[in-house]
Image: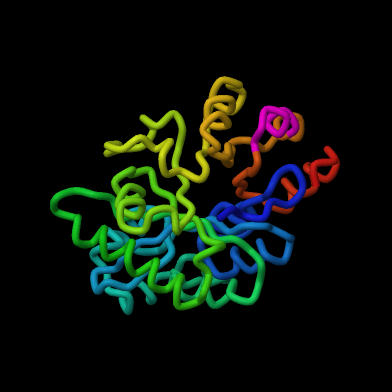
Amino acid sequence: MSIKHVGSMTVAAHRGDSYNYYENTMTAYKKAIECGSDMIETDVHLTADGVLVLIHDHKVDRTTNGKGDVAGFTYEELKKLNAGDTDNPEEIPLFESLLELLKDTEITLNIEIKEYFSKENEQRCVKCIEDVIALVEKYNMGDRILLNSFDAWVLEYVYKKYGKKYMLHGFYPYDIMSNVSLNPDDYLYCACIFDDMNKDLYDYLSSKNIETWIGAGVTQEGLLGVCAKLGAKLVTTNNPKDALEKLKRLGLR
């Protein structure tokens, strides 16, 4: 299984079009689609009553008018918070709402699981993973989603239970991730690198047949071109329209 790349570098909208609109909102996702993004990257949390919602931080403080842990709110309580502003109110979306938006498109979805493993949180972590997979299968999207996490426990759980049925996205060098117990070489489909000018990192991942991706810190046109020559297959960007325009000028789209 593999994603369908577009040109020499695929463009993933980081939390939607998060440069121009409020991150991880339905407006940001819709605008990312409208400008031609190939992939949407998003973040999934569980509410106190076990509902999958899309928000990056473990707390609601930065991106809403509320305060407190996402895990401390029921979904009905979260719905009352404003993830936009007074003139442009936004709700924290349901994960299923994004699947509804994408189901009839060819856009790939990169899902970052934000429930991390601990002895106290294991049950919630497993529920988050399994509920994400169940909804993805409900929408017949298993072949165009990636599951990613900075917690290798999450990725290893999926690999141990499902093998390579789902594409797994990690981070390299692997010590960027926590709870690494298996060799990620054995199960990763792709990995983001943050030292994006380090040819050795590209070469290592390539030798293991793991795709090399670059993150939202790569915004300069020239650097995009350098990373493509080094072997980057995808850039995750806060401003997908800008990235697409630069890649077209470089002849990479």
Which segment is the magenta one?
225-232
Q: Is residue 165 magenta?
A: no
- SS majority, magenta: helix
Q: Is residue 76 above or below residue 117?
A: below
Image x and y of residue 139, in percent: 50, 76
Q: Quadrant of the N terminus?
A: bottom right
Q: Residue at x 62, y 57 (%)?
A: 39
Q: Is residue 226 magenta?
A: yes
Q: Is residue 209 above or below residue 199?
A: below
Image x and y of residue 167, in percent: 49, 53
Image x and y of residue 252, in percent: 80, 42
How many numbered circles does the render carry?
A: 0
Taking the image as drawn, is residue 62 in sight?
no
Q: Residue at x 14, y 53 (%)?
A: 120
Taking the image as drawn, is residue 34 in sight?
yes
Image x and y of residue 58, in percent: 33, 54
Horizontal arrangement in the rendering, residue 252 relative to residue 191 (left or right): right
Q: Residue at x 46, y 70 (%)?
A: 136
Task: Between residue 116 and residue 210, name the one nearer to us.
Answer: 210
Q: How is the image coloured?
A: rainbow
Q: Residue at x 33, y 43 (%)?
A: 152
Task: Between residue 162 and residue 4, name the one nearer to us.
Answer: 162
Horizontal arrangement in the rendering, residue 67 relative to residue 15 (left or right): left
State which quadrant residue 182 falls in. top left
Horizontal arrangement in the rendering, residue 17 relative to residue 241 (left or right): left
Q: Is residue 109 above or below residue 138?
A: above
